[in-house]
Image: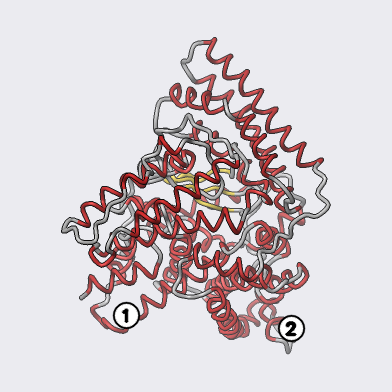
Amino acid sequence: MKKTILSISIALLLFSCDKKENTATDANTDKKFDAYKEYFVEGLWKLYPDWAANKGYHKYDSVLVIPNADFEKQVLEISKAQLDSLSKYDLESLSDNNKTDFYMMKNLLESSIFSINEIKSSEWDPSVYNVGGVFAEILNGNYDSLDNRLRNFNLKMNNIPAYYEAAKANIKNPTLEHTELAIAQNLGGISVFEVDLKTALEKSKLPQAEKEQIVAKAKLSVKAIQDYASWLQKLENKTPRSFRLGKELYAKKFDLDIQSGYSAEEIYQKAISQKKELHDKMFTLADKLWSKYLGNAPKPTDKLALIKQVIDKISLQHTTPEKFQSEIEKQIPELTAYVKEKDLLYIDPSKPLVVRKEPDYMAGVAGASISAPGPYDKNANTYYNVGSLSGWSKEESESYLREYNDYILQILNIHEAIPGHYTQLVYSNQSPSIIKAILGNGAMIEGWAVYTERMMLESGYKNSDEMWLMYYKWNLRTVCNTILDNSVHTRNMSKEEALNLLTKEAFQQTAEAEGKWRRVTLSQVQLCSYFTGYTEIYDFREELKKEQGEAFNLKKFHEKFLSYGSAPVKYIKELMLKDKK
């Protein structure tokens, strides 16, 4: 959604004003709203075919839309018209599930308007223009025959030159940071049109003439990408925009992106308080572990210094660069077995999880991530993307591996895979609400992954003082993500101050801290999603445990919570409490 601006005629869209109805007094409001949602989603996919493909809806795979100014105007007109359509429904006449869908649809439309009118990232973020990912997914997919996917690939390439010309026309005073990212990612994505495409063509049964046509068009596509990168490299940018969003825009973006019961400032203050609590818990454990790891060495008087020395010793226990990915692969079945043994929640064995090297077109922001299939492609692979350490210096690799030491690597796998992102997104795809599945709330998704880290340790997973100390360190990272993001974008935190927060107070390795600084300069608000969602989920669980006492069942809580799809936590909480009555 945020990365695609399209040029499709409004007249062709089912996203039309003709679908408006005054349903306030209609006895079948829910039925009519369900029908409206179908039109809404189909129109959404016509408007955003790349987003549709990402969710497993491949009807428009051959379409690459041109990011021109006309389309922004169309998006604004459509969004305003659909907000008007939504206003015709009597909210109180809708079912609880539809009421939540209503709020999520409304939030999407308001976010679209806010993004175009106020954020205006199409002008200052050149990295939003990148075709590598969507074309790679066509080649990597298994939803259709290879030949059909290659034909869509071929048709989609028709607009690549015009796509990048429109991008150049849109860009005004880009940030230096996003310009560098755009150059690196676009050049990295060229391999899709050279290496990946060549491999696919060798496997295909297309006629030779058609293969040659595709290869010729791919060369034009590569040239367009290279020209765009070259244009960015030569761009005279005397007044680059700051990557900082500013307090007012940040607060608005937080409300729209996170959809929390807390404001940006409230969650920031909670993070500040939580940081102190974690430091206290870590000191207690580090003090206890001191003699085990540092013998009779004198203890520092500074608590943070003492914690750091113990963590530094434990962090020496880590894998090698060559075994980093294989170690992750080995731990996945171990986590699955543990969740089953403890009966924490059901994990569907029929949904494949594939650990792979992070594709080049994704490189540059995070070292580990999940690429999950959408609700229309539920049986496709979920990919666990692992950053490669090839080409890193010995010092950089050592720093990175100390960060992802033997203890934290397990917590990372809980977060990304089982029972974190991978598991939650499988559940989300089973949600009866297509709206909740496609408009997934980032704070709920990230919050769940963070919640599972603590939940697993509370259940007894690899219980030891070392594991808990490292968990607190990892959780401190979540807390400091919020502090960092808010401070950088609204409080003018400098790089030096940021690195001090991350290395001195969050005990992160230099390589990790540098990477996080890069990430906060390239994104806004998203880093808050982890702590915000986690706080809301954990507090809600504890509230129910207190209320239900011995009747509380952890597995039932997890499965009920996940059954509502990737809706904002505040709405899931509302629905679960209502169902309980």
Whether residue 515 sits left or right of residue 110 in the image: it is right
Q: Nearer the viewer, residue 95 or 140?
A: 95
| Label annotation for residue 545 | 1
> Could you classify mark 1 by the number of other residues whose Cα lies within 10 Å: few (under 14), some (14-19), or many (20 or more)?
some
User: Tag 2 or tag 1, which sits nearer the N-term?
Assistant: 2
Residue at 58% from the left image edge and 62% from the top image edge: 406
Whether residue 326 sits left or right of residue 12 in the image: it is right
Specify the amino acid type for callout 2: Ala
| Label annotation for residue 297 | 2
In this rendering, the label closer to the viewer, 1 or 2: 1
SS under mark 1: helix
Whether residue 422 sits left or right of residue 390 in the image: it is left
Residue at 62% from the left image edge and 46% from the top image edge: 128
| 494 versus 183 height, above or below | below
Q: Nearer the viewer, residue 144 or 216?
A: 216
Q: Position of residue 213 (x, y in %)?
A: 58, 15
Residue at 76% from the left image edge and 41% from the top image edge: 232
Specify the amino acid type for callout 1: Lys
Q: Position of residue 130 (x, y in %)?
A: 62, 40
| 483 versus 79 height, above or below | below
| Label annotation for residue 259 | none
| 106 versus 281 height, above or below | above
Rendered image quadrant of residue 486? bottom right
> Could you classify mark 2 by the number of other residues whose Cα lies within 10 Å: few (under 14), some (14-19), or many (20 or more)?
few
Q: Position of residue 457 (x, y in %)?
A: 45, 71
